[in-house]
Every structure is written in C-alpha cells, then in structure tokens.
Amino acid sequence: MSTEKPTPTRVEPLSNTELQIHWNTGDAFALSYEELRFECPCAMCVDEKTGKRMIRRESIPAGIRVLGAQGVGRYAIQFNWSDRHSTGMYHFDTLRALCELAGRRL
Ligand SMILES: [Zn+2]
C-alpha cells in the first residue's frame, strides 16, 4: 500500500457548475463550484480564532466558477474565483476530504 499523501494531478473545469479533480490515488471527483467556494478556508471566509464560517451560502453569486488555479508549494491549491476572491489556500487534505464528503465520484 502506498503511503503517499493524496495529491491532485489534474484540476480542470468539468462543466459550468463543477470542477473535476483527479488524484494520484487514481480516482477523480466532480465538486460543485458553489460548494468549493463556500468552503473557502481564508480569513475573510472563516474566523481564524473560532473557526466560525463568515461567508453565507446566499451571498455566493449565482454561476460562481473557477477562472484559474495555481499550486502553493506542494501542499495546497489557490483558486481564482469569478467573484474576484482568491485568498483561500485549499490544502490537499482539505480538498480530498471535501471531495469525499461533497464530491461526486467520476
Ligand atoms: Zn475566502
């Protein structure tokens, strides 16, 4: 069994509403942009001290999508959102958990 940490190998738009994330573990998930945006881990979206989510689901613009993504070191991905938000760094562990929890297996 591999002890390698799950790492995204390919992150691409799947449709107007979903992002596809392929993993080095050989599986892939579709994740809704809205869900991914809602789960943004940055200090504007989540209170760092209490962990309380500051962003509200209703405040996410309809048709939200990812315009671009770049790797941060070898541990996270930063997304550029269509609502001009881009401060969130999604750690691979968080992204993987989100895929398994809220994603659709491809
Ligand atoms: Zn954020």
Image (spheres, grey):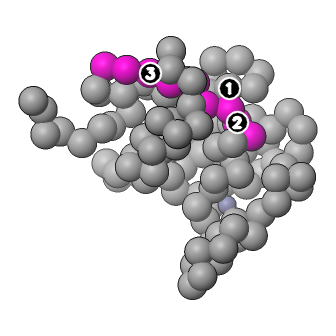
Mark 2 and mark 1: span between their CA atoms? Answer: 5 Å
Residue denoted by label 2: 33
**Which quadrant holds residue 45?**
bottom right
Does ligand 1 reach within 8 Å of label 2's beta carbon? Answer: no
Residue denoted by label 3: 28
Q: Where is residue 72 in the image (x, y as percent from the top left)?
A: 42, 52
Q: What element carries label 1?
A: strand
The circle on residue 18 is 1
Q: What element carries label 3?
A: strand
Q: In this view, does 59 lie to the left or right of 55?
A: right
Q: Where is residue 52 in the image (x, y as percent from the top left)?
A: 66, 74
Q: Position of residue 66 (x, y in %)?
A: 68, 36
Residue 95 visible? The answer is yes
Q: Where is residue 34 in the image (x, y as percent from the top left)?
A: 74, 40
Looking at the rendering, the quadrant in which ligand 1 lies is: bottom right
| Labels 3 & 2 near each other (Cβ < 8 A) | no
Q: Is residue 58 left or right of residue 51?
A: right
Q: Which is nearer the N-term, disc 1 or disc 3? A: 1
